[in-house]
Image (cartoon, rainbow, N blue to C red):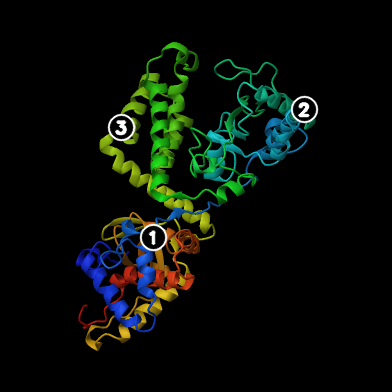
Amino acid sequence: METRDRAADGNGPGAGSGIGSMVEETRRALLARNAHLAGGLEFLFENARESLAFDSLRIQPVVGAHRNLVDTEPFLLPKERFGGTQDLALVSLVREAVDETLRAYAATSPQLVEYVGKTPISPYGSLGLSASRWGYVDWDYIRDLDWRIFLPPEIGHDSGFKSELERTLTQALYRYGLHPLLGGKDPQGRPQVQLRDNRTEEAHGFHFYLIAMKPGFARGNIHRDGGYSPHFAYFPEGSMDEHLESAHLPWSDLIVQQREDYIAMFNQLSFNIFGENSGEDRLYKTHGWYLHKAFKWYATLARARGLSSLEEDLLYQYEHFRGSEAELSYLARYRYYARMNPSPQHLDDVDRDLARTTSIAYARARNFQDPMIGRQISVNSGDAILLEAVEEDFRVAAGKILERVESSRPDKRRRVPMAGQARFADNLAAPCGVNLEDNGQAALIPAEWSMVFCEAYIRQAMRKAAEEKRSIEEEEIRQALGTLLATLLWPVTEVPCGADGP
């Protein structure tokens, strides 16, 4: 795949002189027509005359509202495997049990009525991973039916809610002709609602994790205090919509949060496989069982970092490994443990992987029908991953600016703007041009700018202007962003054969 990567020739975003000259030429061509352009740029950047780099943005962009890509349809209890009167929708089943339990508690705490139907529920673990990866629940792959239930803070683990929820769920299963196992227990010996798979004779147990739904929890950490993470949580039936809309996190904060989640999961897995038992921990560690689960847990870590081939290998090993425990331990420790280890010398690799997979998740959430998103291509600086296309309004505005600049330049120094699309791409150090074969030519822009060239950023800038009591008009912000995009597209415009460079 042919590429033209001009990041190293002094015209890329890291080259202050190239960008600076472009900005100055743009200003000279446009300020006569619009004296407010400089004001817009200076509002967006700390020092627009010196740098228009992402890191110098005065208004740091936030990760916009995340559209949930996992819906309710894949989560089914099939009649052919579990019996009953019909294929049963799992999400509706759990929602029914949670709401009925909330209504019972509202008899003594009336304020809980407002949470009925609104308490977020999230399939977790292998259940959620199966539906998100394959589009259906693979009952040969999953073991337990793990659910996170986000509850008002006054309902805690000692409230008895979990026991009442399991009793309500059992009654609902009976109504649908399903028969929970009497005396069902989880691997640690705790009581558990379980169903037997008639095909494999495996018992699948319902695990409920109660998480306090604190104010603003969508901004926090889902593993620690009930926040939102795009990789480890799925909210399929709309209960989280209002919270997702408010889940605006600075990009840098999100990556830090993802790293903390990853390290916490890695440390938990490492202890379960290689750690020493002590005190109460001895009750929750079963010899050999955790070691086998290591393959599936490592697959989750690989998925979080976008290492799809490693994830598939780990899932295959989980399902088909027939070696000894010693061989299993060797594979877990030496073949996979080192690759996943977030040691200080490997944190840059972890952050790079997490940023890439997060970019893809959000690109797909914003453009779920775009088949180009996630495609890996080769550029001169390495492998890049395509994200969404630049919104047409921004691209057109930048194109007009480039045309005006060209019209003011001497004929011998003119460039012809690249025809074709403009896309964001991850793992990209600087803008570059690329031939996408059947999709034609495209200009690629580093992924972080996707949070700037969008309507959400304009709204964010206008809110900031209102807070600072600045008299900035929306059109000024749009024109400034058009100019900014033009500076990024400038290094990848085509130079006609025989023409002089800039």
Point 60% across, 23% down: residue:
157
- Residue drawn at x 44%, y 18% as measured from the top left: 288
**Sequence-earlier tag: 3 or 2:** 2
Q: Which residue is mark 1?
A: 449
Residue for badge 2: 174
Tell me the mark number nearer the camera, choosing from 3 and 1: 1
Quadrant of the snapshot with the C terminus: bottom left
Three-letter amino acid code at the position of disc 1: Trp
Q: Amino acid at mark 3?
A: Ala
Q: Is residue 396 visible?
A: yes
Q: Is residue 27 left or right of residue 362?
A: left
Q: Residue furthest front?
A: 469
Q: Residues within 10 Å of mark 1 (few under 14, many from 20)?
A: some
**Residue nearer the viewer, 111 or 68:** 111
- Residue 37, how many percent across, how many down? 38, 74
Q: Residue at x 43, y 36 (%)?
A: 261
Q: If you read the primary sequence from the N terminus, does the residue marked by circle 2 or circle 1 appear first?
A: 2
Q: Position of residue 163 (x, y in %)?
A: 67, 22
Q: Which of marks 1 and 3 precedes in the sequence? A: 3
- Residue 391 point in image, percent of width and height: 47, 67
Tell me if 144 is positioned left or right of 385 in this view. Answer: right
Residue 468: x %, y % from top left: 44, 60
Residue 483 placement: quadrant: bottom left
Q: Could you tell me how far apart the alpha carbons at marks 2 and 1 are, in whole angstroms? A: 53 Å
